[in-house]
Each structure stands twice: as structure tokens, then as C-alpha cells.
Image (tube, rainbow, N blue to C red):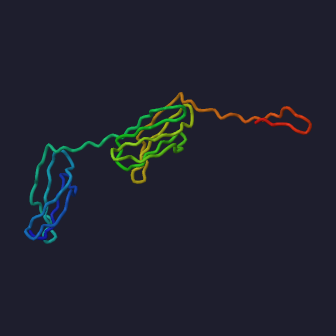
Amino acid sequence: TAAAPVNIYSANNELLATGTADGSGQVTLTFVFPDAQGELSVRVTTNGLETEVASLPYSDIDIPTTPTPSATLSDITGDQGTVSITGVAIGETVTVYDADDNALGTAVTGSNGTAQIVFTFPDAQGELSVRVNINGTETEIATLPYSGIDIPTTPTPAADLTKITGDQGPVTV
């Protein structure tokens, strides 16, 4: 029927697409299949009443798999390290935290869902938490233990007064 709203639903009644029939009573709706197999329900609304006009079974749909987010610790040089992240949605913010919840580095995933974060280790051994921020909520995707990191020692300042000659003398710091 011309100008009639048309809806496509999944087997569990999830609305997949909606549109309005044109003057000839036709509409083409594009949607994403929710499962590899199932049944679609095509319904038309006339006079405020939604009626199923077709039940369309389908199978063998190639549903892309959602990658599993992961992170690995690599390229440790002295007290510097790199965390490589894969399997995260494009444009998400990923942060590496130390055991005290201090952010050590942040990156945004690129077009292939990966990122690298270069950071400085806070301690010779401990654990890192890698978290992705999705819609304002951080979710941990990996816990990375580490040990044997060469943390440079901070020298202890010292001063010496030597070679006093009369009223002059050098201080060596």
C-alpha cells in the first residue's frame, strides 16, 4: 500500500529496518542480519494496525566476528616499554595504568583497531592495567605483569668544600 510504514524485525522482535512504501506501494529496506540464520518478519502498518505480510527464513549469512581486544608488552629498553593493542574498535581511547592507577600513557586506536603506547615503567617490577574507554566507561582488556626492569637510580646530591685559600674556596657539587 502506498505511503504505508514497513518494518523488518528479527526473530526476537528486534527492529532491523523501517521505511515507507512509495506511490507504487514499494520500498527497499537495507539492514544488517543479526545472526547467521534465522527468520525475518516483514510487517506493514495500515490504519494503526501492524500486520505481518511475510516471514522470510534465511541461513548461511557471513556474520563478521568481533575481534577480541588484547594487549602485549614489548620492546623493553631500560625503563621504557611499549604496549601494543589490537582488536579494539577504531577511534577508541586506550590507556596504560600502573598498579597505583596512575596513567602511564594513552593512545587512540587507528583505522585497523590497533595502537601502541610507549611509557616509562614506574618500578622494577609490578603489573600494568590496559583499559579501553568506550562511551565514557573504562574496561580492562589486559593485565600485564612485568619484572627485571632497569630503573635508573637518581644520584644523591653532595657538596664538598675543598682547597680553601685565604678567604676563597671552591665548592664542588
- The picture places residue 4, in percent across and down from the top left corner, at 13, 69
- Seen at 63% across and 32% down, the residue is 153
Image-based side of 21 in relation to 137, left or right: left
Residue most extreme to the right = 166
- Seen at 42% across and 51% down, the residue is 137
The part of the image, by quadrant, that contains residue 48 is bottom left
Image-based side of 38 in relation to 168, left or right: left
- The picture places residue 20, in percent across and down from the top left corner, at 16, 67
- The picture places residue 101, in percent across and down from the top left corner, at 53, 43
Q: Nearer the viewer, residue 90 or 20?
A: 90
Q: Is residue 16 above or below residue 77?
A: below
Residue most extreme to the left = 24
- The picture places residue 144, in percent across and down from the top left corner, at 46, 34
Q: Nearer the viewer, residue 119 or 87?
A: 119
Q: Nearer the viewer, residue 127 or 116?
A: 116
Q: Is residue 112 above or below residue 40?
A: above
- How many discs mark residues in the rendered view? 0
- Seen at 24% across and 44% down, the residue is 64
Q: Nearer the viewer, residue 6 or 14?
A: 6
- The N terminus - image quarter: bottom left
Image-based side of 89 in relation to 101, left or right: left
- The C terminus - image quarter: top right
Image-based side of 9 in relation to 1, left or right: right
